[in-house]
Image (cartoon, helix red, strand yellow):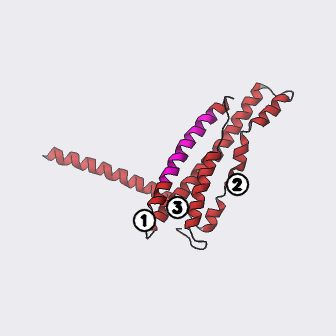
C-alpha cells in the first residue's frame, strides 16, 4: 500500500515537471511575439526571394563553362550555398511558427468558434512540416550535385497563413505584446 503511494507520488512529480517544462517553453516563445498589423506586414515573402534563387542550377552551369572552375570549387560553392540556404530555411520556419502561434492566439481569444480556421491551421502545419522534410532531403542531395531544391511551395504555405493572420488582425490593434 505504501509503495503504491510512493510510486504514484513519483509519477505525479515527474508529470508535473514535464508540464512545467512545456509551459515554460511555450511562455518564453510567446513573450517575443509582437503581433501587430505592422509586424505581419513585415513578414513579406520578399525576404525569401534570394533563397529561391540561391541554388539555381544555371549559375553552376555557367561557371562550369568557364575555364578554371574545378569540381573542388563546385563542391565548395555548393557547400557554402547550402549553408546560406539553411539559414534562410531556419528564418522561414521561425516566421511560419510565429504566424501559426499568432493564429492560435487569435483562435483562443475569439468570441466565436472557428473550426474552419483550426482545420486550415492544422492542415497547413502538416503540409509545411512535410515540405520542410522534403526540402532538407533534397538539399542534402543538392550538396552532392544529385538534384535541385524548390522552396516555392513552402513560401506559398507561409504566405497563405500570413495573409490569413493579416485578415484577422485589425490595422491598429495589437494582439499581444
Residue on which disc 3 sits: 102
Q: Quadrant of residue 55?
A: top right
Earlier along the polypeptide chain: callout 2 or callout 1? 2
Residue 105 image point, x, y percent: 48, 63
Task: Work out whether residue 91 can be spotted.
Answer: no
Residue 13 image point, x, y percent: 29, 51
Residue drawn at x 59%, y 54% is: 95
Q: Secondary structure at mark 1?
A: loop
Residue 118 image point, x, y percent: 46, 57
Nearer the observer, disc 1 or disc 3? 1
Q: Are marks 2 and 3 in contact (CB under 8 Å)?
A: no
Determine the CA span between mark 1 and mark 3.
16 Å
Task: Work out whether residue 87 can be spotted.
Answer: yes
Start-end of magenta stretch? 121-140
Q: Are marks 1 and 3 in contact (CB under 8 Å)?
A: no
Nearer the observer, disc 2 or disc 1? 1
Residue on which disc 1 sits: 113
Residue 131 image point, x, y percent: 57, 42
Question: Position of 161 compared to 59: left or right?
Answer: left
Earlier along the polypeptide chain: callout 2 or callout 3? 2
Residue on which disc 2 sits: 46
Residue 123 is a magenta residue: yes
Q: Residues within 10 Å of mark 1 (few under 14, many from 20)?
A: few
Magenta highlight: main SS? helix
Residue drawn at x 58%, y 65% is: 167
Residue drawn at x 56%, y 62% is: 165
Q: Secondary structure at mark 3?
A: helix
Amino acid at each position: 500500500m505504501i509503495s503504491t503511494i510512493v510510486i504514484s507520488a513519483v509519477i505525479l512529480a515527474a508529470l508535473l515537471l514535464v508540464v512545467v517544462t512545456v509551459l515554460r517553453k511555450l511562455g518564453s516563445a510567446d513573450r517575443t511575439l509582437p503581433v501587430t498589423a505592422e509586424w505581419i506586414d513585415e513578414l513579406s515573402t520578399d525576404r525569401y526571394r534570394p533563397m529561391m534563387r540561391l541554388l539555381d542550377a544555371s549559375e553552376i552551369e555557367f561557371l562550369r563553362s568557364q575555364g578554371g572552375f574545378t569540381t573542388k570549387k563546385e563542391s565548395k560553392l555548393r557547400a557554402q550555398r547550402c549553408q546560406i540556404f539553411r539559414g534562410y530555411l531556419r528564418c522561414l520556419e521561425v516566421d511560419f511558427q510565429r504566424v501559426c502561434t499568432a493564429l492560435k492566439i487569435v483562435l483562443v481569444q475569439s468570441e466565436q468558434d472557428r473550426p474552419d480556421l483550426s482545420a486550415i491551421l492544422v492542415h497547413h502545419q502538416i503540409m509545411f512540416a512535410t515540405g520542410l522534410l522534403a526540402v532538407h532531403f533534397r538539399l542534402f542531395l543538392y550538396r552532392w550535385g544529385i538534384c535541385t531544391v524548390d522552396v516555392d511551395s513552402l513560401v506559398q504555405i507561409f504566405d497563405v497563413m500570413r495573409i490569413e493572420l493579416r485578415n484577422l488582425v485589425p490595422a491598429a490593434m495589437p494582439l499581444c505584446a
